[in-house]
Image (cartoon, grey):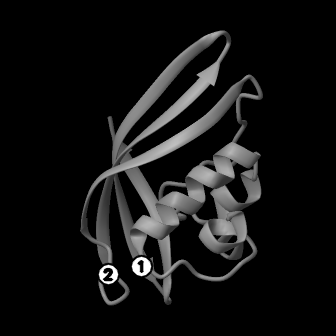
């Protein structure tokens, strides 16, 4: 399942839609792939480094809606809720994330809570 869903994106193949990039970024958070997260973050908003909380386990991603973000679009929005468990508690994070496509690749730009 990992290979069918997101493994190929984490291996370097360009995700064809903003939603697929969002799913692969969630997977990268789940498996601790900081390199992929930074590589798919737009340079205009990308932090110099990123430290993940080893005590957080990402469990499920629910896509609430998408606006544009298809293979021929230049920008897109993905609204999602990511569910986690960490430090003895369950949690969720809701975001409306913006993406841009440049040079045939989608990049995460930023998010509103």
User: Dots 2 and 1: beta carbons under 8 Å?
Assistant: yes
Q: Quadrant of the N terminus?
A: bottom right
User: Which quarter of the picture shows residue 109?
Assistant: bottom left
Q: Nearer the viewer, residue 52 or 82?
A: 82
Can you tell which mark lies on residue 101?
1
- Residue at the outermost front position: 1
The location of residue 53, given as percent across then percent down, is 71, 28
Of the two numbered discs 2 and 1 on the same chain, state the one appearing first in sequence: 2
Residue count near mark 2 (Cα–Cα under 10 Å), binned few <14, some 14–19, many ≥20: some
User: Which quarter of the picture shows residue 112?
Assistant: top left
- Residue at the outermost top position: 88
Measuring 48% from the left and 46% from the top, which residue is drawn there? Answer: 61
Left or right: where does residue 112 sit relative to residue 12? Answer: left
The total of numbered circles placed on residues is 2
The location of residue 21, given as percent across then percent down, is 51, 67
Q: Secondary structure at mark 2?
A: loop
Left or right: where does residue 52 sit relative to residue 5? Answer: right
Rendered position, 93 above or below 4: above
Rendered position, 95 above or below 70: above
The location of residue 46, given as percent across then percent down, is 56, 54
Measuring 67% from the left and 27% from the top, which residue is drawn there? Answer: 56
Measuring 50% from the left and 33% from the top, which residue is drawn there? Answer: 83
Can you tell which mark lies on residue 92?
none
Rendered position, 36 above or below 89: below
Q: Secondary structure at mark 1?
A: strand
Left or right: where does residue 72 sit relative to residue 16? Answer: left
From the image, tell me which residue sits under label 2.
74
Q: Quadrant of the C terminus?
A: top left
- Residue at the outermost left position: 67
């Amino acid at each position: 399942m990992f290979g069918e869903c997101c493994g190929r994106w984490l291996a370097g193949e360009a995700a064809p839609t903003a939603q697929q990039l969002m799913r692969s970024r969630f997977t990268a958070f789940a498996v601790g792939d900081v390199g992929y997260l930074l590589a798919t973050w737009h340079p205009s908003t990308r932090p110099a480094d990123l430290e993940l909380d080893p005590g957080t386990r990402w469990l499920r991603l629910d896509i609430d809606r998408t606006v544009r973000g298809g293979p021929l679009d230049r920008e897109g929005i993905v609204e999602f809720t990511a569910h986690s468990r960490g430090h003895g508690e369950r949690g969720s994070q809701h975001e409306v994330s913006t993406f841009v496509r440049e040079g045939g690749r989608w990049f995460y730009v930023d998010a509103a809570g």
